[in-house]
Image (cartoon, rainbow, N blue to C red):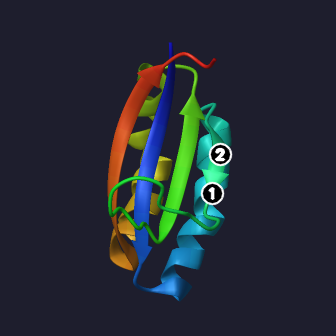
Amino acid sequence: MSAYYLVEVNVTNPELYEEYRQMVGPTLEKYGGKFLVRGGSTQTIEGDWAPQRIVILEFENSEQFQRWYYSPEYTTARNIRFRASTSQGILIQGYTA
C-alpha cells in the first residue's frame, strides 16, 4: 500500500529553507520517494484552513517512508527545515484511484 506524507509548511527563514530545498531531492531519490505536490497556491474549499505551503510526497509503502524520514541524510535536512519553518505533517496509507 502506498504511503503519502502531507506537510503544511510555514516558512519563517526563506534563505535557510532554500538550503533545505537543495538537500531534500537527493534524499528522496535515494529512498524511492517522489514529490506529488511542492508548493503552489491553495484555495480553501471547506472550513477555515488556509495553509501557506503544502507538500505531498509519495512512497512505495510506510516502511520506505520511515527509512527515508529517519535516514541520516534526511535527518540533517529535516533539522534545517525545523530551523527554517514551522510545519505539521501526517502520513496517509492508501491506494491510488
Viewer-closest of 66 and 43: 43
Q: Residues within 10 Å of mark 2 (few under 14, many from 20)?
A: some
Between the C-alphas of marks 2 and 1, the distance is 6 Å
Viewer-closest of 11 and 46: 46
Q: Residue at x 61, y 63 (%)?
A: 39
What is the three-letter code of the residue carrying label 2? Phe
Residue at the limit of the structure toward the top, as seen here: 1
Q: Which image quarter holds the C terminus?
A: top right
Point out residue 46 in the picture as x, y percentages from the top left corner: 40, 53
Question: In the rendered structure, are the residues bearing label 2 and label 1 in contact, judged by CB atoms less than 8 Å apart?
Answer: yes
> From what the image shows, is residue 94 above or below residue 76?
above
Q: Residue at x 58, y 56 (%)?
A: 24
Q: Residues within 10 Å of mark 1 (few under 14, many from 20)?
A: few
Left or right placement of residue 28 versus residue 77 in this view: right
> From what the image shows, is residue 96 above or below residue 50?
above
Viewer-closest of 22 and 12: 12
What is the three-letter code of the residue carrying label 1? Arg
Q: Which mark is residue 13?
A: none
Q: Give the SS element for disc 2.
A: strand
Quarter-of-image position of residue 79 = bottom left
Q: Residue at x 33, y 56 (%)?
A: 47
Quarter-of-image position of residue 31 = top right
Q: Which mark is residue 38?
A: 1
Point out residue 35 in the picture as x, y percentages from the top left corner: 65, 45
Q: Give the SS element for disc 1.
A: strand
| Residue on which disc 2 sits | 35
